[in-house]
C-alpha cells in the first residue's frame, strides 16, 4: 500500500513519510544496503503469527548471519548489541515506550510507526493526539533516537508485518520492580532500559505492572 492510499483510509490522521523533515525530531533514515543480511534472515527464518505480535529480543542465529556489523556498531558506539525482531498483526497505538539509547528498526515489510517525544510527558501522562504518524516503506532502515516515544509497528496489509529490532544488549530482557520511587520517571520503568506508558485498553501490560499513562484515543490504523 502506498502512503497516499493509507492517507485516504485514515482521513482523520496525518501520515507522514520518513523523508519528511518532521521525522528528524525522532530519528534518521539509514542505508538499507548495510542491512541486507538481516532482510534475508527475516524473510527466510521468521514467521508472522496468526494473531497478535511475536517479539524476540535477541536471536543468536540472526547475529551470526550478519557478515558486517560496522554500520550497527557505529550507531551504538561499539556497545554489545541484541539482534531481535517483532513480527505481527498490530493495528493500534496501545502504548508508548522509550529507551535511553538508540534503536534500529529494519522494515522488511511496509509498516506504520507512531512517534512522540519524552519532553511531552507531563505528570506521568502523554496525550495520544500528540503522536506523529510515519509510513515506513518495505526494505527501509531507520534509527530511532534515544528518548523517542514509540511502540509496536502497525500493519498495512492483511499479511501483517516483519521488522528487525536492534538495541543495546539487555534491553527488554528483564522486568523491573520499582518498589522505591525516587522521581516521577521511575513509575514508567517497566523492563531493562524500557520506560513505558500504556493505554487503558491495553490490559495485558497493565496486568504486568505497566503504568497506564497514555491518555486519549487509542489510535487505530486502517488499510
Image: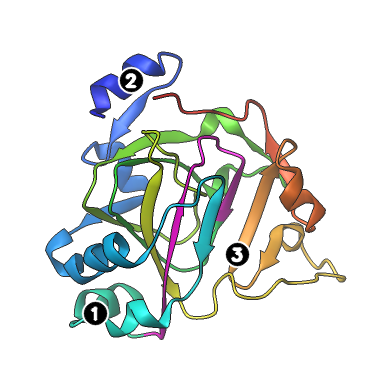
Q: Secondary structure at mark 2?
A: helix
The front one of 32 and 126 is 32
> Which sits earlier in the primary sequence, circle 3 or circle 2?
2
User: What mark, if any, has residue 7 been given in the picture?
Assistant: 2
> Which sits earlier in the primary sequence, circle 1 or circle 2?
2
Q: Position of residue 208 (x, y in %)?
A: 78, 58
Could one spot residue 15 in this view of the protein? yes
Of marks 1 and 2, the one in the foreground: 1
Residue tagged 1: 66
Q: Residue furthest left?
A: 33
Report the colour scheme. rainbow
Q: Residue furthest front?
A: 50
Quadrant for the C terminus in the image: top left
User: In the image, is 170 to the left or to the right of 108?
Assistant: right
Residue displayed at 22% across by 65% down: 40
The front one of 206 and 124 is 206
In 3D space, how far apart are the residues under numbered discs 1 and 2 (Cα atoms)?
36 Å
User: In the image, is 186 to the left or to the right of 56?
Assistant: right
Residue displayed at 46% across by 68% down: 101
In 3D space, how far apart are the residues under numbered discs 1 and 3 (Cα atoms)?
26 Å
The front one of 48 and 219 is 48
Of marks 1 and 3, the one in the foreground: 1
Q: Residues within 10 Å of mark 1 (few under 14, many from 20)?
A: some
Could one spot residue 211 in this view of the protein? no
> Which sits earlier in the primary sequence, circle 1 or circle 3?
1
Q: Residues within 10 Å of mark 3 (few under 14, many from 20)?
A: many
> Contact (CB < 8 A) between labels 3 and 2?
no
Q: Is residue 183 above or below residue 28?
A: below
Residue tagged 3: 194
Q: Position of residue 210 (x, y in %)?
A: 74, 54
Magenta segment: 79-97
Amino acid at each position: 500500500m502506498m502512503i497516499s492510499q493509507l492517507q485516504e483510509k485514515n482521513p482523520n490522521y496525518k501520515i507522514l513519510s520518513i523523508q519528511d523533515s518532521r521525522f528528524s525530531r525522532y530519528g534518521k533514515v539509514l542505508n538499507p544496503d548495510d542491512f541486507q543480511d538481516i532482510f534475508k534472515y527475516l524473510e527466510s527464518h521468521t514467521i508472522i503469527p496468526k494473531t497478535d505480535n511475536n517479539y524476540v529480543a535477541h536471536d543468536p542465529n540472526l547475529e551470526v548471519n550478519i557478515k558486517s556489523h560496522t554500520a550497527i556498531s557505529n550507531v551504538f558506539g561499539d556497545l554489545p548489541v541484541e539482534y531481535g525482531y517483532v513480527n505481527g498483526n498490530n493495528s493500534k497505538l496501545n502504548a508508548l515506550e522509550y529507551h535511553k539509547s538508540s534503536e534500529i528498526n529494519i522494515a522488511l515489510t511496509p509498516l506504520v510507526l507512531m512517534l512522540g517525544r519524552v519532553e511531552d510527558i507531563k505528570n506521568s501522562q502523554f496525550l495520544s493526539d500528540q503522536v506523529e504518524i510515519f509510513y515506513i516503506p518495505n526494505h527501509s532502515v531507520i534509527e530511532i533516537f534515544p528518548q523517542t516515544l514509540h511502540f509496536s509497528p502497525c500493519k498495512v496489509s492483511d499479511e501483517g508485518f516483519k521488522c528487525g529490532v536492534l538495541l543495546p544488549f539487555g534491553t527488554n530482557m528483564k522486568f523491573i520492580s520499582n518498589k522505591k520511587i525516587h522521581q516521577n520517571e521511575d513509575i514508567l520503568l517497566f523492563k531493562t532500559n524500557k520506560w513505558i506508558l500504556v493505554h487503558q485498553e491495553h490490559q495485558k501490560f497493565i496486568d504486568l505492572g505497566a503504568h497506564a499513562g497514555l491518555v486519549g484515543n487509542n489510535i487505530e490504523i486502517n488499510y
